[in-house]
Image (cartoon, rainbow, N blue to C red):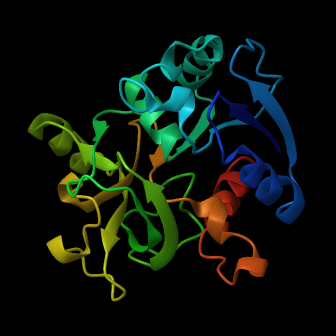
């Protein structure tokens, strides 16, 4: 399987993603520069974490105008797999490939720590290797991670089983006290209606190598790999 990992000015998790996909999971990876147009016949496009364009205006707001995004939007609209992690999630929302927006954390501080998330749905190409309501521990690192959407969008997300991950406590309980950034409905990750575009704020690539003593994120990538084989 061939993964294309996009680098924008300010991306800082692209090499982490290459390491997990190429070295740990033995997949073919290629680097895609934000000024590229050719997606090099990749099976999956990954928008990694970081601070594209310094997060000026708001996170992802400038990156959506990068040349490569036109190709990615066409790719996604034709059923191609697209994954956005942290800043990548923000870019997908700004580009309207995913509904809603990511706002400043409710405490107005940058949050960098391990977080527990509940696998709310395993009926997706990105979570099929997890059990329903499985609790996994995945690192977060963001200042604008508070997911927000209007009531009609939230209703649609729930009706179409598009809410994939929710912040929870270590026992899997989804409650206000386990909501690390104030996201509506404790949302940590969603997919689109066609279930081929996925975004999440936590970093599964930082929990996919046994050297880090945490492989809770590994099944996220294995789900995507096996769903396309």
Q: Position of residue 220 (x, y in %)?
A: 60, 61
Query: Residue placed farthest to the bottom in the image?
Result: 171
Image position, residue 168 (x, y; %): 31, 75
User: As displayed, is residue 77 above or below residue 176?
Assistant: above
Q: Residue at x 41, y 37 (%)?
A: 192
Q: Is residue 188 visible?
A: yes
Residue drawn at the location 38% of the way across and 76% of the way down: 133
Count of numbered circles on the image:
0
Q: Nearer the viewer, residue 55 or 82?
A: 55
Q: Which residue lies at the image location 67% right of the left edge and 58% below the top edge? A: 221
Quarter of the image for residue 28 reads: top right
- Give whichever of 158, 112 is nearer the camera: 112
* Residue 137 image offset from top left, x and y in percent: 49, 77
**Above or below: residue 90 compared with residue 95:** below
Judged left or right of residue 130, residue 2 is right
Quadrant occupied by the N terminus? top right
Q: Position of residue 169 (x, y in %)?
A: 31, 82
Left or right: where 13 falls relative to 145: right
Q: Residue furthest left?
A: 151
Residue 208, compared with residue 99, is above or below; it is below
Query: Residue 197: in sight, yes or no?
Result: no
């Amino acid at each position: 399987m061939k993964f294309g990992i996009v680098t924008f000015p300010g991306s800082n998790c692209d090499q982490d993603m290459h390491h997990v996909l190429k070295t740990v999971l033995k997949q073919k990876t290629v680097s895609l520069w934000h000024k590229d147009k050719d997606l090099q016949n990749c099976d999956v496009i990954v928008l990694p974490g970081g601070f594209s364009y310094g997060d000026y205006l708001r996170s992802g707001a400038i990156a959506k105008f990068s040349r490569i995004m036109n190709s990615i939007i066409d790719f996604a609209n034709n059923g191609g797999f697209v994954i956005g992690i942290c800043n990548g999630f923000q870019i997908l929302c700004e580009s309207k490939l995913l509904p809603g927006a990511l706002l400043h954390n409710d405490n107005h501080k940058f949050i960098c720590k391990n977080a527990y998330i509940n696998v709310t749905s395993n009926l997706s190409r990105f979570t099929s290797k997890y059990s329903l309501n499985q609790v996994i521990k995945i690192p977060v690192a963001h200042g604008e991670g508070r997911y927000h959407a209007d009531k009609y969008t939230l209703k649609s997300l729930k009706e179409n089983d598009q809410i994939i991950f929710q912040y929870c406590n270590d026992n899997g309980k989804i409650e206000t006290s386990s909501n690390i950034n104030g996201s509506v409905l404790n949302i940590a990750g969603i997919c689109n209606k066609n279930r081929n575009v996925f975004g999440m704020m936590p970093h599964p690539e930082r929990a996919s190598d046994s050297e880090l003593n945490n492989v809770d994120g590994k099944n996220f990538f294995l789900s995507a790999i096996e769903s396309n084989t």
